[in-house]
Image (spheres, rainbow, N blue to C red):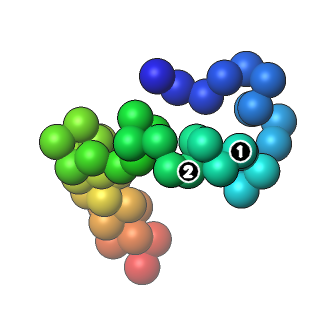
Amino acid sequence: MGTPKERIPYPVWQYSGEKWRNAEYQYSDEIHGELKERLSNKIQELMKAAY
């Protein structure tokens, strides 16, 4: 998966409706949950360090 090279310079809201409705591209906690948790933990760590 990933972003097609031709889409990289454009914001996500300019993607075709097909991408928004296609289950292949939708968030899945099973697939993305670990990354989401790591990002959340890092954000919390950075916030604590900043304040």
Picture residue at 31% right of the left edge, 66% below the top: 44
- Within 10 Å of disc 2 (Cα), the crowding (few <14, some 14-19, many 20+) is few
Q: Give the residue number, with chain letter if any, for mark 2.
A: 20
Residue 13: x and y in percent read: 71, 56
- Within 10 Å of disc 1 (Cα), the crowding (few <14, some 14-19, many 20+) is few
User: Residue 16: which numbered mark, if any?
Assistant: 1
Determine the CA span between mark 1 and mark 2. Answer: 7 Å
Q: Is residue 43 above or below residue 30?
A: below
Where is residue 6, by image quadrant? top right
Element type where label 1 sits in the image: loop
Element type where label 2 sits in the image: helix
Q: In the drawing, does residue 43 fall left or right of residue 19?
A: left
User: Residue 37: which numbered mark, if any?
Assistant: none
Q: Closest to the observer: 21 or 12?
A: 21
* Amino acid found under the numbered disc labelled 2: Trp
Where does the C terminus fall, quadrant-wise?
bottom left
Where is residue 31, by image quadrant? top left
Is residue 34 something one can see in this rendering?
Answer: no
Picture residue at 38% right of the left edge, 42% below the top: 23
Q: In this view, does 39 lie above or below 19?
A: below
Q: In the drawing, does residue 19 fall left or right of residue 50?
A: right
Q: Closest to the observer: 38 or 46?
A: 38
Is the Cβ of the residue at disc 1 closer than 8 Å to that at disc 2? yes
* Amino acid found under the numbered disc labelled 1: Ser
Picture residue at 21% right of the left edge, 49% below the top: 29
